Amino acid sequence: MPFGPSVGNATSIPITIFDRSQTVTPTYGLSSASSSYNEGSTATFTLTTTNVASGTAVAYTLSGVSSADITGGLLTGSATVNSSGTATISVPIAADLLTEGTETLTVTAQGASAVVT
């Protein structure tokens, strides 16, 4: 049985055509829960995105510190975007007990960056 209204033997069915010719550009932003953290704590950053699919892994890098300053020593990682378009980046800062003065940690992901001391 055909769908839609019919007149005599003719039937019409409305359809939707999606225009895929326009490219959607993803955007990225980074922010930190605080502007400074103590050694031995975890710095938390929020990656906010638009036009990025849920489940997408976004690579990030850490700079301004050495691998010895980060628990686990990794200066790269990835964060997975959730259904709200955000991802959390947690950076465990080592309590190394060295007198170093103030250090500046920068997280960069897809051209967006956030800085804490």
Image (cartoon, rainbow, N blue to C red):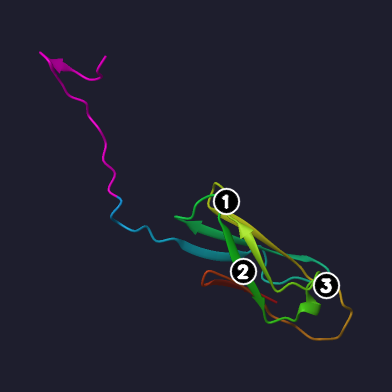
Label whose residue precedes the other's in the sequence (1 or 3): 1
Q: Secondary structure at mark 3?
A: loop
Residue under the image location 60 percent in, 66 percent down: 59
Q: Nearer the viewer, residue 63 or 117?
A: 63
Position of the N terminus by quadrant: top left
Q: Mark 2 or mark 3: which comes first in sequence? A: 2
The magenta region covers 1-19
Residue 94's label in the rendered image is 3
Q: Position of residue 66 (x, y in %)?
A: 75, 81
Q: Which residue is mark 2?
A: 60
Q: Which mark is residue 55?
A: 1
Quick check: 56 above or below 14?
below
Q: Amino acid at mark 3?
A: Ala
Query: Where does the image place residue 18, in percent across and percent down from the top left?
Result: 29, 44
Q: In what element is the residue under mark 2?
A: strand
Determine the image quadrant of residue 24: bottom left
